[in-house]
Image (tube, rainbow, N blue to C red):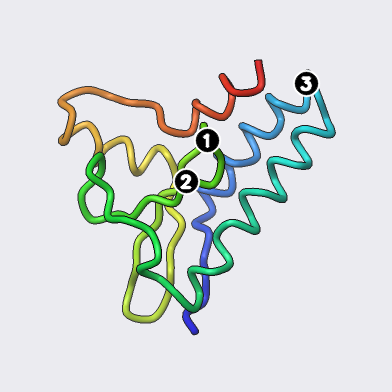
Amino acid sequence: MLPIIWRSSAREDLAQILRYIAQANPQAARRMRHLLEEAVLPLSQHPYLYRSSERVPGLRELVAHPNYLVLYRVGATRIEVVPRHGARAEQKQWFGRRQPLADLAIRAQR
């Protein structure tokens, strides 16, 4: 089993999204947090369970919610959940411009 590590910047991104959702609906923010944190748990035993990202080379995509992707990197000794900011830089190379992945969760709550 590989440990799942959320980079501190990925945790900060998650907290920012949850704060935004909580402004309108605190209970929805709690549900979203639980959903996203629980969604990554199977990666510990099955790191290649989800597809390689076509948007961000070198990462894999877990669709944790219809409007929210969790991006992660499989390492030799751990699974690393990456922040949307780090993914954006890699994604910019792919698309030629920025594409806000985590912002989809915000739109889903409107």
Secondary structure beneath dot 3 equals helix
CB within 8 Å, label 2 to label 1: yes
Q: What is the residue that sits farthest to the right in this orientation?
A: 27
Relative side of 97 to 35, left or right: left
* Mark number, residue 23: 3
* Mark number, residue 66: 1
Residue 18, horizontal then vertical, whole percent: 68, 34
Q: CA distance from mark 3 to mark 2?
A: 24 Å
Residue 36, horizontal then vertical, whole percent: 61, 49
Sort mark 1 into few (<14), some (14-19) or many (20+) by Cα contacts within 10 Å: few
Secondary structure beneath dot 1 equals loop
What residue is at 77 percent from the left and 32 percent from the top? 28
Relative side of 15 to 79, left or right: right
Which is nearer the N-term, disc 1 or disc 3?
Answer: 3
- Would you identify the image quadrant in which residue 26 lies? top right
* Mark number, residue 28: none
What residue is at 25 percent from the left and 39 percent from the top? 55
Residue 8, horizontal then vertical, whole percent: 54, 53
Residue of label 2: 63
Where 105 sits versus 32, above or below? above
Looking at the picture, which amino acid does disc 1 mark?
A: Pro
Sort mark 2 into few (<14), some (14-19) or many (20+) by Cα contacts within 10 Å: some
- Would you identify the image quadrant in which residue 30 lies? top right
Relative side of 38 to 98, left or right: right
